[in-house]
Amino acid sequence: MTYGQGATDLSDVTSELEGCVPLVTAGFLRHSPHCLAILDREGMIVFMGDAGLEMLDLARAGVVGRACWDLWPLDARPAMRQAVTRARLGEVARVRGKGPEAGGLPGDWSVTMTPLRDPANRVVRILSVARRMSAGPVAAS
């Protein structure tokens, strides 16, 4: 898959998730104030919500098909890869650390990766929820 290919319409993503637990809705995915992404089992981004695209100053076409850890600073990538692996194995994985921000200044982020299961209890996708804990450095006033 090359960047920009894949689910550009939420109907593609939500049809694949039909019957998954926890139930996710198209509106929640698109309009959450957090950086929400649906990943495939290997950690490639299938969909990212509007707030995440805005926070990271990305275009949807440039993010779909990329490995989620590629958006993070080099020193944070191993923890992100490990979180994807744990979620693929069925665990809820949490990571906290310095992450990307629009403008290139890293901020503090808390990321939770949750496995999404089909009716047969197989992990079919991963829900990544990244919450900005603080923005990058703020100048003193």
Image: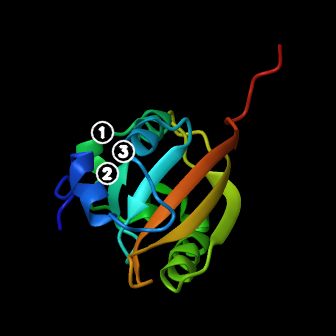
Q: Residue at x 43, y 62 (%)?
A: 68
| Residue nearest the observer in this picture, 89 or 54 | 89
Amino acid tagged 2: Val
Q: Residue at x 47, y 40 (%)?
A: 56
Q: Residue tagged by mark 1?
A: 59
| Residue nearest the observer in this picture, 58 or 32 | 32
Amino acid tagged 1: Ala
**Proximity of marks 1 and 3: CB atoms separated by less than 8 Å:** no
- Badge nearest the viewer, 1 or 3: 3
Q: Earlier in the sequence, mark 3 or mark 2?
A: 3
In the image: residue 104, left or right of residue 41: right
Rendered position, 21 above or below 56: below
Mark 1 Cα shell of 10 Å, populated few (<14), some (14-19), many (≥20): some
**Proximity of marks 2 and 1: CB atoms separated by less than 8 Å:** yes
- Badge nearest the viewer, 3 or 2: 3
Mark 2 Cα shell of 10 Å, populated few (<14), some (14-19), many (≥20): many
Location of residue 33 in the rendering, given as x and y in whole percent from the top left corner? 55, 35
Q: Earlier in the sequence, mark 1 or mark 3?
A: 3
Amino acid tagged 3: Ala
Element type at marker 3? helix
Q: Residue tagged by mark 3?
A: 26
Element type at marker 1? loop
Q: Residue tagged by mark 2?
A: 63
Q: Quadrant of the C terminus?
A: top right
